[in-house]
């Protein structure tokens, strides 16, 4: 009897915690999204779909959605492609390859707050290193973070810099686990390196690319730290991304019902996209 | 896959150039932290400081409650790690080595939790903690991370690799259940345990989002929050001080990473197993 019960007791703590802090909140969020809960209504009042209607009617929501789409569709492919290219290059066992790998991965372990602070300094309009480097090649200075047409691209660049090393390591691990016999056979058959990569390595890496894409998507939807520290969503909401939008409504305007509806929308979008991509990869 | 020598050399220099670009912000962080205020605001940035000005670190340290933040970060990160290791290894033990009804569903539920990040659940968890009366306290910083789907998954993979025969032999010697987990499974899975511990250590030491949501007073703030407040409230823009503070916040994890790299690489090995 004791032996039959034991496994359940072992999984209980982990399962209870995941249920309370990961699964229950999803149910709670959906429920909250049908209620009005803010300063004017401190006790949740049922309002049906009103929060969702307000969300869809908010022009800022569409702006934020557009920003998030640009951020996601640029950072995901760029960081994955960069990670893959570097993994393939480092897999050549070049001189000081280990050192290069360390350099490329270091931004990943840097706290986002630290990265954001350094970025604020480097992209400072008057004394920043970035504008000095531009000056060296004869270009005029740029308002990296205060020009509404450019700020999102600066944030994108920092986002890529912070994450591509992760994908490099994922691909390096995958490359080292590839069946060497197949690669060797192709080499003996005289296939050129470029052809060998596209016809053998790349298809074999497909599961890794799927994994990397899903992780990159979820990471990009989570982006918040750089926005909150560097731009506060500005200038004129040009860097306002979904999590920041939800955070603002929840913790600055205290419209918790509305914020919950936005969070549900984000969850639906992120996982809808993940499902579509997974179906495509596993077709 | 081996390239011809000339292309290898070209590739090598291209990588070197990219590495210089990637390392530039970190180099600039370190250099700026050692500069005097006069050296910071120069029309032509200086690539090297005139001397090593340790004074910045002392002044930055004293400008905010960094000592307190440090202690809080250590306490919170340690508590999270211990809890995650305990809950993950117990669950992984059952999921890898025991047969019981609903095991498949439970495993699926654990893996599913991997893709529910705190950025989705924070509103609900905030309200839950408010009901518990835990806001603005250590439990609020720790409790939501008491279990780890990633850790459970990673340890399960490691435990699966330990041969069944070993468990039978241990059982004959009277070493069963939790004793087997403690004396055999965990020591035999040391590289995976270390890999998970390090990845979790970095993630929670660096975490900015959750502490921002639940802390409201200096006594329980962690380093990332303290640094962010120091940066956003610092109206004088003494970049040398800000960089010094940034450096002592980032340094512990950088040091850990430089000495334990191979375990970080190991933590990625399982990505390939998810086919």
Image (cartoon, rainbow, N blue to C red):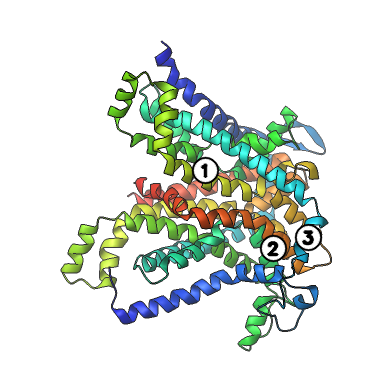
Cα–Cα span, label 1 and label 2: 27 Å
Residue B238: image x %, image y %?
Answer: 79, 68
Residue beneath label 1, please?
B197
The residue depicted at 38 percent of the width and 29 percent of the height is B104
The residue depicted at 63 percent of the width and 42 percent of the height is B77
Cα–Cα span, label 1 and label 3: 31 Å
Cα–Cα span, label 3 and label 2: 19 Å
Q: Do labels 1 and 3 share a chain?
A: yes
Residue beneath label 2, please?
A117
Q: Quadrant of residue B2?
A: bottom left
Residue A114: image x %, image y %?
Answer: 66, 59
Q: Mark 3 lies on which chain?
A: B
Q: What element carries label 3?
A: helix
Please, is residue B174 above or below residue A55 in the view?
Answer: above
Q: Nearer the viewer, residue A140 or A87?
A: A87
Q: Residues within 10 Å of mark 3 (few under 14, many from 20)?
A: few
Residue A239: image x %, image y %?
Answer: 66, 62
Q: Which mark is residue B58?
A: 3
Q: Residues within 10 Å of mark 1 (few under 14, many from 20)?
A: many
In the rendered view of the protein, which quadrant contains the N terminus of chain A? top left
The residue depicted at 67 percent of the width and 52 percent of the height is A244
Please, is residue B166 above or below residue A201 in the view?
Answer: above
Q: Which of A88 and A159 is in front in this view?
A: A88
Tell whether label 2 touches label 1 (CB within 8 Å).
Answer: no
Q: Do labels 1 and 2 share a chain?
A: no
Which-is-in-front pick, marks 3 and 2? 3
The residue depicted at 42 percent of the width and 44 percent of the height is B191
Q: How crowded is mark 2: few (under 14 residues within 10 Å), some or many (20 or more)?
A: many
Q: Which of B262 and A120 is in front in this view?
A: B262
Please, is residue B95 above or below residue B262 in the view?
Answer: above
Please, is residue B247 above or below residue A211 in the view?
Answer: below
Q: Which of A34 and B178 is in front in this view?
A: B178
């Amino acid at each position: 009897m004791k032996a039959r019960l034991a496994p359940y007791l072992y999984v209980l703590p982990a399962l209870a915690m995941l249920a309370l802090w990961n699964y229950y909140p999803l149910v709670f969020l959906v429920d909250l999204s049908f209620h009005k809960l803010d300063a004017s209504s401190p006790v949740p009042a049922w309002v049906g779909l009103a929060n969702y209607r307000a969300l869809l009617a908010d022009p800022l929501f569409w702006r934020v959605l557009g920003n998030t789409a640009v951020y996601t569709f640029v950072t995901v492919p760029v960081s994955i492609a960069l990670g893959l290219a570097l993994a393939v290059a480092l897999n050549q066992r070049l001189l000081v390859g280990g050192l290069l790998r360390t350099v490329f991965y270091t931004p990943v372990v840097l706290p986002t707050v630290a990265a954001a602070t350094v970025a604020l300094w480097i992209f400072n309009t008057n004394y920043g290193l970035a504008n000095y480097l531009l000056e060296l090649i004869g270009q005029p200075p740029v308002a990296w973070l205060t020009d509404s047409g450019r700020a999102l691209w600066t944030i994108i660049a920092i986002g890529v810099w912070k994450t591509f090393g992760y994908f490099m390591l994922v691909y390096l691990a995958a490359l080292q686990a590839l069946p060497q016999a197949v690669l060797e056979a192709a080499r003996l058959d005289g296939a050129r390196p470029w052809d060998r990569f596209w016809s053998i390595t790349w298809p074999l890496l497909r599961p890794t690319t799927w994994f990397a894409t899903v992780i990159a998507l979820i990471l990009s939807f989570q982006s918040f730290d750089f926005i909150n520290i560097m731009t506060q969503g500005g200038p004129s909401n040009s860097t306002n991304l979904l999590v920041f939008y939800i955070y603002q409504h929840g913790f600055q305007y205290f419209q918790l019902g509305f914020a919950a509806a936005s969070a549900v929308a984000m969850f639906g979008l992120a996982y809808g996209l993940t499902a579509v991509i997974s179906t495509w990869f596993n077709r | 896959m081996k390239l011809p020598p000339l292309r290898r050399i070209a590739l090598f220099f291209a990588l070197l150039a990219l590495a210089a670009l990637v390392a530039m912000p970190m180099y600039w962080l370190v250099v700026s932290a050692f500069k005097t205020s006069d050296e910071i605001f120069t029309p032509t940035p200086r690539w090297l400081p005139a001397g090593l000005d340790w004074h910045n670190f002392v002044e930055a340290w004293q400008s905010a409650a960094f000592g307190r933040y440090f202690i809080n970060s250590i306490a919170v990160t340690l508590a999270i790690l211990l809890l995650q290791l305990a809950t993950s290894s117990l669950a992984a033990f059952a999921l890898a080595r025991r047969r019981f009804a609903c095991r498949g569903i439970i495993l699926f539920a654990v893996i599913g939790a991997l893709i529910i990040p705190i950025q989705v659940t924070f509103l609900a968890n905030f309200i839950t903690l408010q009901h518990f009366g835990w806001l603005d306290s250590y439990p609020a910083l720790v409790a939501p991370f008491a279990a780890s789907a990633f850790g459970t998954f990673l340890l399960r993979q490691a435990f699966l690799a330990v041969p069944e025969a070993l468990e039978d032999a241990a059982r004959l010697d009277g070493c069963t259940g939790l004793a087997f987990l403690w004396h055999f499974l965990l020591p035999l899975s040391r590289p995976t345990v270390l890999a998970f511990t390090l990845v979790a250590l970095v993630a929670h030491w660096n975490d900015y989002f959750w502490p921002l949501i639940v802390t409201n007073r200096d006594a329980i703030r962690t380093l990332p929050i303290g640094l962010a407040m120091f940066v956003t409230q610092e109206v004088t823009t003494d970049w040398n001080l800000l960089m010094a503070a940034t450096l002592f916040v980032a340094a512990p994890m950088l040091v850990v990473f430089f000495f334990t790299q191979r375990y970080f690489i190991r933590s990625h090995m399982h990505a390939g197993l998810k086919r």
